[in-house]
Image: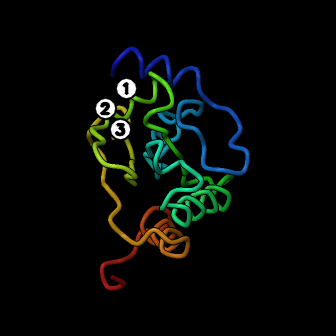
Amino acid sequence: MSPALVILAASLLTSALSKPVDLTNHTLVDHLAKGKHLFVLFSNAEFDDTTGAHGDEKDAWEKLGVKYKDDEKVLVGHLHCYASVTEVKMCKEHKIVGYPTLAHYKGDEWTKPGRHQQYGGKRDFHSLVRFVEGYMREPYKADEL
């Protein structure tokens, strides 16, 4: 694990307000080590522009963050891949090349950059909730798919 990630992981853990947590200010390693999941939106300035084309998607993500704010199994996060040197570095380490990118992590996947699964489903609120409930919180059984 890189020294930057160790420092970052050690210095994190703040409250998540009523939005997805800012991943540069939250303990992720402990969360994942306990068998929990992380669902992350990687964005650029264009996505974060309130007048941009992604308004509905951004609103859905923020609503998802509110819904799972205090969830014991799932942490919903948002990483702004342009906002600071730390965030730019994290996005590069995780090999994020397109925006917005939704990815989910479990176990040691966050601490071993590049090991994540990208979410390819619909990005409306109800589809995101269905994914979290059916895959991340309580995985579907094979006969339910």
Is residue 103 visible in the rendered structure shown here? no
Label 2 sits on residue = 92
Label 3 sits on residue = 108
Left or right, residue 32 beside residue 1: right
Residue 126: quadrant of the picture? bottom right
Label 2 amino acid? Answer: Lys
Work out whether 6 lies above or below 90. above
Label 1 amino acid? Answer: Lys
How far apart are the two marked residues, 3 and 2, measured between alpha carbons?
A: 18 Å
Left or right, residue 19 beside residue 5: right
The single residue placed furthest to the front in the displayed view is 51
CB contact under 8 Å: marks 3 and 2 = no
Place of residue 138 in the rendered image (x, y in percent of width and height, measured from the top left): 48, 68
Q: Residue at x 49, y 61 (%)?
A: 54
Q: Which mark is residue 89?
A: 1
Secondary element at image label 3: loop
